[in-house]
Amino acid sequence: MEKRNIEIKRKFLHLFLGIILVALLMFGFVGKIHVFFMIIITVIISFLSKKHKIPVVYWFLKNFEREENLKKFPAKGFIFYLIGAFLVLLFFPLDIAMPAILVLAFADSIGHLFGIKFGKIPHPFVSTKFLEGWIAGFIAGFIGAFIFVPWPQALAASFFAMLVEGIEIKIGADEIDDNLIIPLVAAIAIWGVRVLF
């Protein structure tokens, strides 16, 4: 039960982080250089957290981090979230990067939360996920992207992002974090629709 509660809290934080990050980008309060430095600072804090209980950081980790990451790689999800956001900001214009970040925030969070609560049909590719969650994530990702881009681009971004979210992609024995893959795939899909149509 505790593990499930942490996952629910993580996904709400995940959603909130994406909305805040996009709002800060949209109003020009932060840019890719700021996100880059956030990554560096978070990596340093993660490294220090392996050996020390930094007061506020420790509370966040205890309440939002998966137990398996607490000792090995504290704040792993947050770091990969920022790296995914940074990569789309680095390689794509802001009008593609922002909807791609919202696809990550909405699709991954809502899909997971919906799957936990209402999931009955197992996902065909990932045994820990449900088809109902995939559908909810697809719809949520579409809505998130549609705030910034026309519906065909939003549809492609959400569909392809959720497609890769449902596949475990590995390099060697390590699975690539979906916080890294989802925004990149969403951005490529938006760009691809723009180029083709």
Image (cartoon, rainbow, N blue to C red):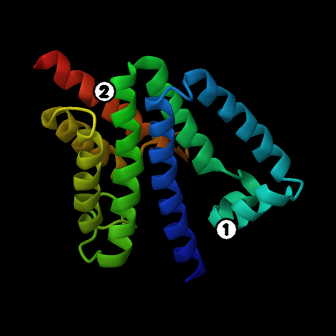
Q: In this view, does 154 lie above or below 89?
A: below
Q: Can residue 57 be seen in this view?
A: yes
Categorize mark 1 by other alpha carbons within 10 Å: few (<14), some (14-19), many (20+).
Answer: some
Q: Residue at x 37, y 42 (%)?
A: 102
Residue at image mark 1:
63
Residue 176 appearing in the image:
no
Quarter of the image holding residue 158? top left
Q: What element carries label 2?
A: helix
- Say which quarter of the image contains residue 193: top left
Distance from disc 2 to disc 1, alpha carbons, whole Å, reads 34 Å
The secondary element bearing badge 1 is classed as helix
Q: Position of residue 39 (x, y in %)?
A: 66, 34
Q: Quadrant of the rendered structure where residue 70 is?
A: bottom right
Query: Quick one: which residue is furthest to the left in this view?
Result: 197
Foreground residue, 168 or 66? Answer: 66
Point out the image quarter for the C terminus. Answer: top left
In-image side of 171 versus 118 (left or right)? right
Nearest the camera: 80 or 42? 42
Q: Which residue is drawn at 47% across and 30% down?
A: 27
Which amino acid type corresponds to the residue marked 2 in the rendered image? Ile
Give the amino acid at mark 1: Asn
Q: Is residue 156 left or right of residue 18?
A: left
Quarter of the figure that contains the N terminus: bottom right
